[in-house]
Image (tube, rainbow, N blue to C red):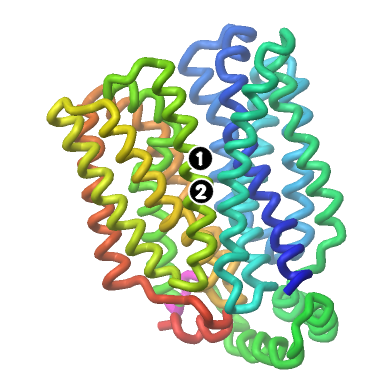
Amino acid sequence: MGKIAFWSITVAVAGFLFGFDTAVISGADKPIQSLWQTSPLFHGMFVMSSALWGTVLGALGGNYPCDKFGRKPTLVLIGILYLVSAIGSALAQDPYTFAILRFIGGLGVGISSIVVPAYISEIAPAKHRGRLVAIYQFQIVFGILIAFLSNYLIAGTSSFDWRIMLGVEAVPALIYLLFILKAPESPRWLVLHGNKAEKAKEVLRDLGEEDAEAIVAAVQADASQHKTDKLFSGTFKLPITLAFLLAAFNQLSGINFIIYYAPRVFELAGLDASSSLLSSAGIGVINLVFTMIGIYLIDKAGRKTLMYLGSVGYIISLAVVAWAFNTNQGGMIVVFFVFMFIASHAIGQGAVIWVFIAEIFPNSVRSKGQSLGSGTHWVFAALITLLMPFFLEQYMPGTVFTFFAFMMILQLLFVFFLMPETKGKTLEQLATKYEQ
């Protein structure tokens, strides 16, 4: 278990880079617009959103290198993309170069959301798989926090402090890259795509698996049943439906809206600018703490139980925030229940999404299934992030939160009627169970 945990944590550092890369841009927002004198529309749609479009493309196409070249080379590619993006965007001399290099970092984010959960799920034993894959989510949240802290410490240190903020990411990217070069290839990929059963057994033994022969035999048996599998052949209707709905509901909760626009929401609730920023920082702390609780519980309580907890918490918190806005209560009631919303997300969807999507597809189409789920997640994230300022102008905040609360009632019904429990089962057992 020691080596499996080590490589799971090492690979999950890609999640730290994901979180850091996503959040660090906030420190460069106003300085680069002032420096290059770009219009608000160009700045928002091209400069600031370039990484987001890279993320969508990386998520939709990342399954190709993952299957064609292997999990390890794809993990190395992620490190290179982050490193190039960090150094390049820090040195960029014009908005076009900057946007292209941020787009490259976004590709790394999108591809990492496919290959990291797939890799960890394929090396982890069934009884620990949930918490090991969920480390990825913890690293994302931790990366966001460190990016905000780093920006705070660097701000004002020089006239080009925003370049230092962006360039700092090169340090963890380089460390990650150096470590990942020594990581073993996924044994399941070796059997399925490389036809290297003996090498797979060697990797499993080195990772501490006592019964490498049985694991490889199970993978081979599974592979023989899925030689010509195509994701949309009709065989995988259930896992496709599960992955799509879970990923869509993740964003229809309003999580990205809250994280990206928290200060604006708190100001609408009547807080002054300083209190709004302080409350926003509290979101990061709550997110980290409850993500850790989710990781601890996911293999004990199970994925479905955490989704029940999260869904009920979502509904209560969103409904109360909607009520507070509709009745002009505002203030600390909104802050408290937004914190409850973040806690509900972290212990439910936040902890479960990457684990569950990595589990429900068989080895032969896992990366394609990951791409479907991750791509759905990022497309909805992009749409909500871009459309929310418009909706906040057109509708009262209470109406927006009522919509999100209704979506979470639908999620609760999804969990009750459709979502299966996956804890404690091998990937091969799950593969046969969810085919139709």
Q: Quadrant of the C terminus?
A: bottom left
Q: Viewed as shown, does residue 155 lie left or right of 80?
A: left
In the figure, 38 relative to 81: above or below?
Answer: above
Give the residue drawn at x 34%, y 61%. 309
- What residue is shown with label 2? 289
- What residue is shown with label 1? 285
Q: Amino acid at mark 1?
A: Val
Q: Amino acid at mark 2?
A: Val
Chief secondary structure of the magenta span?
A: loop
In the rendered image, residue 259 lying in the magenta stretch gets the answer: no
Q: Quadrant of residue 189?
A: bottom right
Q: CA distance from mark 2 to mark 1?
A: 6 Å
Q: Residues within 10 Å of mark 2 (few under 14, many from 20)?
A: some
Give the residue drawn at x 33%, y 27%. 265
Q: Secondary structure at mark 2?
A: helix
In the figure, 51 relative to 361: above or below?
Answer: above
Q: Secondary structure at mark 1?
A: helix
Residue 343: x percent and y percent? 41, 48
Span shown in magenta? 231-235
The reply to whether residue 380 is visible in this rendering is yes
Q: Quadrant of residue 186?
A: bottom right
In the figure, 351 relative to 100: above or below?
Answer: below
Give the residue drawn at x 67%, y 55%. 12
The reply to whether residue 196 is visible in this rendering is no
Residue situated in front as seen by the camera: 321 or 184: 321
Residue 134: x percent and y percent? 57, 60
Q: Quadrant of the N terminus?
A: bottom right
